[in-house]
């Protein structure tokens, strides 16, 4: 798929090469030495207050049935969005194990609308999870996860419906732990993910969190991960691989990557090792579509050190992403007078260009109330973008792809 990134200028190529040479800027990252690592197996980390020991790479119900047995053998024991499985589709690789040997997560969405306009409804959430437990035959879900999360700290204070649904289900033995997958909501005058998670850590019974996190992210995200560790809150990074998919399709980038200083590394492997070098981070959920990706991700996740070639590759990817790939920090959204969900639009672009899932990307984009065509080209967002992206131009480009 061509997204314009194949048309790098000579100056761009020189800049990328220089960025790779300048890998010393990320060379001081800590080397992980995980005590729970077994030979050929994923290391495990404690998932905060849940007490669950989970494999560092999180599995997902949308992985193909051929991948799942390999993942289970490698030590994947935590499964995201497991409510999608019923008694017939639950993978045999899990069915054939003792129930306590793996962990299933049920994500719970707002009702009567999407994550921006939908409502929290205690009774409907309760009935949804109860029905999924029955349909799946799994007995219980280890984790009840509020998908997309609260719009603001104020909503978290005023609306206890999600927590009450969880507590009712827990009393019946149908769920065990409470977690949240938190997004930013500054486009609807809500709060940023880390602001909401800080509040929840001290005021609500959430035991674990999931959030956007990638190399070059805002300091507030790094600070949240550190605080969460101190408060025994589990942390799972998502949307970590920005630009990796399109770089893999870019022949000019691949030629640069062929330089001996990058030998033995790939952008995906370098990113995984960088994430894993943060001992405060519990795990990461990474889209995995085929055996090659599974092999690459597992190989990186079972390695105990980030080598010089990984630092260099990560720096090369960072340079490649500059001006091209959104980090989903959502800072630009606060400056948009039209209140466009810029970060969401660029997230959907990732689905299409990095994950090669255009159907999903177009479906999500179509559900927006204000898409890329709402941009008036005022440029108020531009100074806020650390990636130096020409946001108005890119919004038009993404609309051509997804609209």
Image (spheres, rainbow, N blue to C red):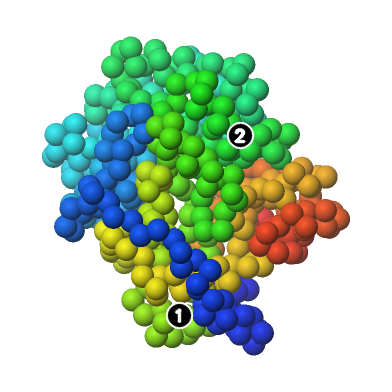
Let me know if residue 24 appears in the view: yes
Residue 13 sits above or below residue 338 on the image: below
Q: Position of residue 137 (x, y in %)?
A: 24, 27
Identify which residue is drawn at 33% across, 50% down.
57
Q: Position of residue 244 (x, y in %)?
A: 48, 66
Callout 2: SS? helix
Classify residue 50 as left or right of residue 23: left
Residue 156 sits above or below residue 34 on the image: above
Q: Quadrant of residue 101?
A: top left
Residue 257, disc: 1
Q: Position of residue 209 (x, y in %)?
A: 46, 36
Q: Earlier in the sequence, mark 2 or mark 1?
A: 2
Residue 56, disc: none
Q: Which residue position is annotated with label 2?
A: 195
Q: Position of residue 106 (x, y in %)?
A: 38, 31
Classify residue 350 as left or right of residue 10: left
Q: Nearer the viewer, residue 73 or 371?
A: 73
- Mark in the foreground, 2 or 1: 2
Label 1 neighbourhood size at 10 Å, few (<14), some (14-19), many (20+)?
A: many
Identify which residue is drawn at 58% across, 22% down.
156
Identify which residue is drawn at 79% across, 47% down.
336
Alpha carbons under labels 2 and 1: distance apart: 38 Å
Label 2 neighbourhood size at 10 Å, few (<14), some (14-19), many (20+)?
A: some
Q: Nearer the viewer, residue 138 or 232?
A: 232
Identify which residue is drawn at 36% across, 33% down.
48
Classify residue 88 as left or right of residue 276: left
Q: Nearer the viewer, residue 179 or 33?
A: 33
Callout 1: SS? helix
Q: Quadrant of the C terminus?
A: bottom right
């Amino acid at each position: 798929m061509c997204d314009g990134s194949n048309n790098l200028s000579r100056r761009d190529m020189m800049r990328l090469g220089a960025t790779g040479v300048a890998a010393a800027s990320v060379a001081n990252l800590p080397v992980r030495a995980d005590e729970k690592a077994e030979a050929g197996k994923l290391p495990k980390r404690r998932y905060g207050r849940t007490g669950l020991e989970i494999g560092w790479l999180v599995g997902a119900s949308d992985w193909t049935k051929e991948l799942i047995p390999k993942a289970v053998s490698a030590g994947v024991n935590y499964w995201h969005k497991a409510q999608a499985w019923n008694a017939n589709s639950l993978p045999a690789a899990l069915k054939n194990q003792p129930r306590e040997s793996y962990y299933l997560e049920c994500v719970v969405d707002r009702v009567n609308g999407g994550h921006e306009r939908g409502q929290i409804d205690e009774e409907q959430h309760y009935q949804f999870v109860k029905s999924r437990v029955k349909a799946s035959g799994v007995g219980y879900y280890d984790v009840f996860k509020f998908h997309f999360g609260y719009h603001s700290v104020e909503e978290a204070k005023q609306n206890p419906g999600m927590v009450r649904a969880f507590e009712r289900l827990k009393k019946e033995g149908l769920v065990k732990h409470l977690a949240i997958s938190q997004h930013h909501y500054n486009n609807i005058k809500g709060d940023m993910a880390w602001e909401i998670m800080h509040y929840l850590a001290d005021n609500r019974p959430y035991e674990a969190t999931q959030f956007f996190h990638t190399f070059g992210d805002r300091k507030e995200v790094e600070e949240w991960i550190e605080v969460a560790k101190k408060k025994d809150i589990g942390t799972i990074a998502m949307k970590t691989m920005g630009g990796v998919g399109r770089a893999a399709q870019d022949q000019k980038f691949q030629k640069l990557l062929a330089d001996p200083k990058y030998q033995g590394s790939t952008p995906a492997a370098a990113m995984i090792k960088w994430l894993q070098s943060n001992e405060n981070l519990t795990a990461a959920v990474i889209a995995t579509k085929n055996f090659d990706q599974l092999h690459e991700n597992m190989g990186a996740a079972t390695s105990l050190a980030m080598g010089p070639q990984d630092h260099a590759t990560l720096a090369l990817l960072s340079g490649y992403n500059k001006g091209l790939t959104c980090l989903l920090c959502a800072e630009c959204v606060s400056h948009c007078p039209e209140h466009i969900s810029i970060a969401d639009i660029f997230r959907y672009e990732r689905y299409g260009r990095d994950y090669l899932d255009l159907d999903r990307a177009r479906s999500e984009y179509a559900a927006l109330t204000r898409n890329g065509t709402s941009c008036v080209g005022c440029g108020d967002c531009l100074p806020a973008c650390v990636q130096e992206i020409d946001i108005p131009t890119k919004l038009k480009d993404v609309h051509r792809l997804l609209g």
